[in-house]
Image (tube, helix red, strand yellow):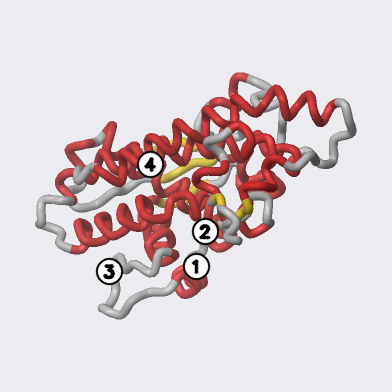
Amino acid sequence: MNVPLIRPEFLLTHEAGVRYVLRRAYAAWPEPDRSRLVYANVPRVQAFYTQGKVFWEAARKTKELSVRYLLCYTAAHNWGKVRILFADPHYPRRRSDLTHGLSLRSGRREAGELGGEVYVEPHGLFPLLAGEERSTLVGKRVTVRALFRAAFAHGFLHLPEEGDSPVREEEVCARDEDTLLRSLRADLLHLMATFVLANFARYEADRFFRLLDGSYDFFPLALEAYAELCTSHLPDLVFSREISSGLLPRELPAEVLYERT
């Protein structure tokens, strides 16, 4: 007999699925605290994940590139809250935990250039997601250009600058002097990249649209390809650690959700 399988994108939209994941995530907590924390956080995880899924599905449907990046980052931000709740059932512990944890400091306003730096704040979503790497990331800066090259290369895309041959991630990071990019996890790298692109699309739309007008032909192609990567694989990019650790199984027999644990 074929057993129905439930994939991660459906697992966290249903109460039974969220309860199953949280009981595994909070396995180190003794009873009755474990059951109490699971009960308290099931509706929160379900709401954050479902809202993120709504934004992601909207991003997949729209053809407007600036809107796609805004929706992708908003989805990733909501799913980031889910990931933090897996690790800390008492999130948020302070108001500052609700911020993005990143800030964008704009650079020169030349056409065809997304300049500036990204700064990792001491509090907020990004440093909380960094976990054990938080202490080495807080206070670090990275140029937007270097960030794009690393993010695009991670998706096996090419942002031309020197020569015509494709650049792989390890080659980009090997020659980049910024230790942040050399050590940044994939999930954090893409969260930072979508944060930057969403901010440019929202707050500096004139610069963003100048990149898409065809005058700088590599930017439209690269940004379109990266948006396609995000909209197609955003759950895998965001939840890569939880999937690889087995906390979020890729396929799960439906009957498991109703077993007592």
- Residue 43, by quadrant, is top right
Circle 3 SS class = loop
Task: Compare marks 3 and 4 and give the one earlier in the sequence.
Answer: 4
Q: CA distance from mark 1 to mark 4?
A: 29 Å
Q: Could you tell me how far apart the alpha carbons at marks 1 and 2 are, in whole angstroms?
A: 6 Å
The residue indicated by pointer 3 is 160
Q: Quadrant of residue 52?
A: top left
Of 153 and 75, the residue lying toward us: 75
Residue at 56% of width from left, 54% of height from top?
Answer: 5
The residue that appears at 60% across and 61% down in the rendered structure is 1
The local crowd at label 2, few if under 14, some if 14 to 19, many if 20 or more residues have their Cα within 10 Å, is many
- Is 172 positioned to the left or the right of 198 in the image? right
Tags 3 and 4 in contact by the CB under 8 Å rule? no
Q: Which residue is mark 4?
A: 56
Q: CA distance from mark 2 to mark 4?
A: 26 Å
The reply to whether the C-beta atoms of the residues labelled 2 and 4 are less than 8 Å apart is no
Residue under label 1:
173
Disc 2 element: helix
Q: Residue furthest top?
A: 95
Q: Earlier in the sequence, mark 1 or mark 2?
A: 1
For marks 2 and 4 on the same chain, the one whose residue lies earlier in the sequence: 4
What is the distance, in whole Å, between disc 3 and disc 4 at their CAs? Answer: 28 Å
Q: Is residue 167 left or right of residue 216?
A: right
Tell me the kind of residue under disc 4.
Trp
Q: Tell which circle, 2 or 3, labels the residue nearer the N-terminal end.
A: 3
Which kind of residue does numbered mark 1 sit on?
Answer: Cys
Residue nearest the observer in this picture, 227 or 52? 52
Q: Residue at x 51, y 64 (%)?
A: 177
Residue contact at pointers 1 and 2, CB within 8 angstroms:
yes
Q: Where is mark 2, residue-wise?
A: 181
Q: Mark 1 and mark 4 in contact? Answer it, CB < 8 Å.
A: no
Mark earlier in primary sequence (1, 4): 4
